[in-house]
Amino acid sequence: MAPKKPLCLPSLLLPLLTLLLPQADTRSFVVDRDHNRFLLDGAPFRYVSGSLHYFRVPRVLWADRLFKMRMSGLNVVQFYVPWNYHEPEPGVYNFNGSRDLFAFLQEATLANLLVILRPGPYICAEWEMGGLPAWLLRKPKIHLRTSDPDFLAAVDSWFKVLLPRIYPWLYHNGGNIISIQVENEYGSYRACDVSYMRHLAGLFRSLLGDKILLFTTDGPEGLKCGSLQGLYTTVDFGPADNMTKIFGLLRKYEPRGPLVNSEYYTGWLDYWGQNHSTRSIPAVTKGLEKMLKLGASVNMYMFHGGTNFGYWNGADEKGRFLPITTSYDYDAPISEAGDPTPKLFAIRNVISKFQEVPLGPLPTPSPKMTLGPLTLHLDGNLLDFLDFLCPQGPIHSVLPMTFEAVNQVHGYMLYRTYLTDTVSEPTQLWVPNNGVHDRAYVMVDGVFQGVLERNMKHNLFLMGKIGATLDVLLENMGRLSFGSNSSDFKGLLQPPILGQTVLTQWLMFPLKVDNLVKEWFPIQPLKSSHPQTPSGPTFYSTTFPILNSGGDTFLFLPGWTKGQVWINGFNLGRYWTKRGPQQTLYVPRPLLFPRGAHNRITLLELENVPPQPQIQFLDRPILNSTKHRTYIYSLSSASEPMELSGH
């Protein structure tokens, strides 16, 4: 008989190491109803979390923002998954680059942060259409966020792609996701379709299993329709609200278990034309400390807001259409540029009274850069580039068609018709039934005449000879993300009327503006400034070097009116200098080429260019420059209804 081989040291240590290492099957995150707390791996656990949206932060900056959150004393990061960011067309999925949410999950792991995931399907988040894909509206009669078979079929298809990819990241599987929200503030939606919520809960369970904690979040008045048996009920409210009353109401729906505020508002969103919203540091810290003394778990919304780059901002409807600004700074503890604020240090001090805060100082603010003024040069009127903007040619229809009907998701579409009679006296152009969604720039024979706007009364009078070209450029300013949340179709929803004449026989040009900026402008020589200051939709651009390593900066557009900005082909977002409050656009350092390389900035100015077409880069933002008073939102305030508290 062959002698037994002696056991080597590694083989003796292996079983011991196996016992010492955390195993997936011993990991757990559960509700301890007997003691009104959470248990993490069997030990009492309370989370102090913050919201950060990976889709509002360039990927190269994810690690920086997450590290600062961890150093602030947070142990969890909470974030949404916007469906429309990942499925741009039915059955076409994108998880690459800045859309790689699994890379974001990995960055959270490296930052030693657990994760609360909010995959929707509806997320609000002041994001375009609340995260729902606009292609759903190609079926005009669809009922969003209900048991409508068309909506459920699309939701099921999406979640059967997303949730299996999420499954390995669940905490009990060795990942970092401790809980997942089902839908989002559904009690604030008019439908109150219990069958829909049950369908979602069943779908999540079938794809994720029984071990993951599923929960709902609602404002206090939404708990009735938003909660569902089998899902843990949480609530959201801000510093100005009656905590005792709201937590007491929560206990009617969740009698036992930890108290949870899933959205404790550190600031608030901004609308174009209103003042920059703020929350005072004492109010935020007082409410936070009171909740932590109660033993509650809390998520701060937002901890870092970020930016609505491109066309991704959402909108509210509160008597009128209210699009969200490009900046999503939110007066959050970490600024839009990723810098710690006094609010962060005050919050960190409160957290340190209840749990350990990582040792070491927080990183200092990032280097900032100033540059300019720089003079921009005229590239031409938008109409000059129509063949490049719409290479496939126009679509003809007797009556105007919506963006959705011609598969135009974002941006701009040009509507063109021709006058069938001479209009020799100034005659009003109007669109019945509030049919401009959202803003129209009107031209006759290429000459800018003025603007029509959703929910606004503009008196626009036209003249023109028979056969004159009438162009109406429509801007989609972001689909409703909250409020009524009805299907928010874009474009001309009704045919315009000139005097008493209904205008028909339209050509529609879905415009690919981003393609023009990325592909055509960079190869064209810069033109000299036009001798006359043009008006109406016009492209301007220039190039500029950065002689050193550069830094974060803020684009200031004094005298410009409204439009879109691209830097090195990246769609920075909308500006609306004339309306405010936001006057500068955040430009992250990674978007710029340093050390002498040429950077290109392109503007699409939609209305009026200043006499001196100049811009500047500043070392600090200007986010508050209107004469409108600040809006303070409180669930207990009679003047501000509860429904706008949603995210």
Image (cartoon, helix red, strand yellow):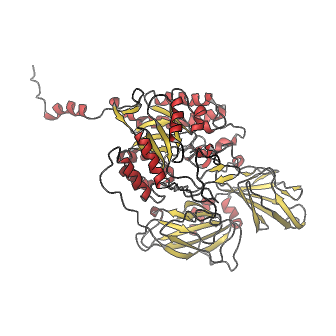
Residue 488 x %, y %: 69, 46
Q: Position of residue 487 (x, y in %)?
A: 69, 43
Inspect this view and state whether residue 103 appears: yes
Q: Measuring 13% from the left and 33% from the top, which residue is drawn there?
A: 8
Q: Is residue 539 above or below residue 218?
A: below
- Can residue 160 be seen here? no
Which residue ends up furthest to the top in the rendered image?
1
Residue 591 against residue 211 in the figure, above or below? below
Which corner quadrant holds the C terminus? top right
Give residue 547's quadrant in the image: bottom left
Residue 536 sits above or below residue 320 on the image: below
Give the farthest residue toward the bottom. Answer: 531
Give me the residue at 71% from left, 57% from top: 439
- 262 or 472, nearer to the observer: 262
Classify residue 218 as left or right of residue 352: right
Where residue 422 sits, quadrant-wise, is bottom right
The residue at the point 39 percent across, 49 percent down is: 350
- Figure disc tally: 0
Q: Residue 7: percent from the left, percent from the top? A: 13, 29
